[in-house]
Image: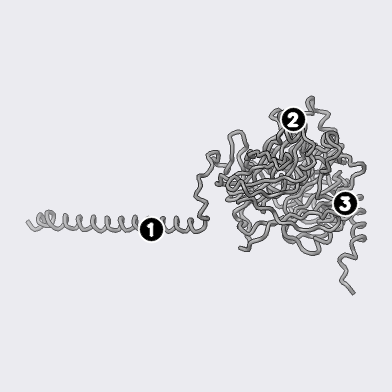
Amino acid sequence: MRLSLVYKLVLPGLLVLYTGVMLGLHLGLLQRAVVVANDNQQFLQQLLPENSKEMEPVYRHESHFGVYNQKDRRPLNDLQSYRKVEQERQTLKLMESSDGGGTLQTKSSTSVGNISVFSVYYDNRPTLKNGQPCMRIIALKRFNSVESLICHFNYGHNTWLKVHAHSYEMCENHGRYYGGWIFSCEIPEEILNNTVLEKLTVLSISSTFHPEKQVKLKITAITFKESFEKSSSSVTIPSSIHSHLKFENSQKQKFGLCLPPIFGDISLSLLIQFIELSKILGSSHLTFYIYDISDAVEKLLTFYEEEGEVTLVNWKLSPQINEREIWYHGQLLAIQDCLYRHMADFEYLLFVDLDEFLLPVYNYTWSDMVHFLRNFESESNNVAGFSFKSAFFDPKQVPDPSQQLTFLQLLLRNKVLSSVRTKLMVAPQKIFELGIHHVSKTIHKDMRILEVDPGIAKIHHYRPCIINYEPDMKCYSEERDETILKYATNLVENYQTIIRETLDLFVPDR
């Protein structure tokens, strides 16, 4: 009887009490989750500017590779993780030569509305669509901004022709808040057929948000020197206004080398080895984008610049941009700037880092290598460039004691090569946009990039082996590679010569 009463009264009461307690806890947790979510949303709104509420462009997509822009583009690999950076705000500047040459002077980037413009190029390549010359504007913009640019061409007698720029987002912005863009303005026929063509040394541009506020910008360079010189003898735009190239008879050189923004603790010895070996391989000029270097490194690079072998471009972030909001110090912008800056000066441009060399296996120079590669292509005119796989040489390996210089002492590399961290040598006349590890867009769709067999040439990358984004990469198996030793004699001699010539730069004043 009592047991039956327990079942009928006590147990149901306990069940109701348990249910009430659990329901209360559940609702409490839900409420807390809502509060946390609201707090996170408020925190994010505090981080983002008020005017960042514009709709994100519809052409941005997500994939397991990362962020990419258009369906016909290769997905982006976020190859490098965030670096630890101080939360200080820098000023984005370009280093340009003064009108008289010689001493370099800094010049801030130009703000046109909310767009930061770095450089302007007169693109007159005969291979352009319909042969129509245009202005290429290399700039930085927020990813979700709908702002664009307008070009204003002076037709004379206070008459201006207004052209709205075509906006093109660069491929490897990696989804960061700020990214690189190329704005293109076709030059009207009225301007091309008029004698005021020489006034194109300066271009007036404005923002679509404030079209009445015009900003005058100096044109940095042209992209096709020969046709420009033939079209008008009165035009004075040089092939590269702000470089110190010393070419005999202004002949186009075979190979130039472009480096991304450099920073950190850079060894003078390794820097000399890098420059001298690059010269032996065939580079007639190197362009450095300077982000943050020591006084000693600046002195050394200035020595090379005064010899006409180096161009220095000072590269800083604007005060409005946190370093985490842009990909790797604006590397992609620097790549495009170097591509267009030297497009008229070189047949080929190579894009590598300070710890990388492109070494032919059987040939001695890049010239012999390119000649060898083109002989095997029936349609070599359609080849816009070459892509090279990378081999990792760990700097922490036991050095070869028989060699004097660091790069000559590191002879062990991984057997499996990287097919992701490729580097490029391109014919700049055939490229519209260049990525970090691939060509994003050629000037014509029928042009292609030749993937070079590593038995012919490969990138020697002096860093520990990494397997990120490469499931087939194996770092544990190594082999000896003595390809670099064929340059040992010349490299040591050149290195010792530079040491003697620059010794006075580093001796303290007495």
Tell me the SS state at disc 3: loop
Q: Distance between the residues labelled 2 and 3?
A: 33 Å
In the rendered image, which residue does mark 1 sit on? 35
Left or right for 422, reference 97 = left
Height in image: 277 above or below 445? Answer: below
Instruction: Give the percent coordinates (x, y) of residue 337.
Output: 73, 46
Q: Nearer the viewer, mark 2 or mark 3?
A: 2
Q: How crowded is mark 3: few (under 14 residues within 10 Å), some or many (20 or more)?
A: some
Instruction: Give the percent coordinates (x, y) of residue 77.
Output: 62, 44
Left or right for 428, reference 77 = right
Q: Nearer the viewer, residue 382 or 342?
A: 342
Direction bottom: furthest residue: 510
Q: How far apart are marks 1 and 3 (CA)?
A: 63 Å
The answer to which quarter of the image holds residue 189 is top right
The answer to which quarter of the image holds residue 89 is bottom right
Q: Nearer the viewer, mark 1 or mark 3?
A: 3
Q: Nearer the viewer, residue 232 or 169?
A: 232
Q: What residue type is labelled 3?
A: Gly
Instruction: Give the percent coordinates (x, y) of residue 147.
Output: 58, 45
Tell me the SS state at disc 1: helix
Q: Residues within 10 Å of mark 1 (few under 14, many from 20)?
A: few
In the rendered image, which residue does mark 2 sit on? 131
Which of disc 3 and disc 2 is earlier in sequence?
2
Q: Do the residues labelled 1 and 2 touch (CB within 8 Å)?
A: no
Q: Which amino acid does label 1 sit on?
A: Val
Q: In which quarter of the image is the C terminus?
A: bottom right
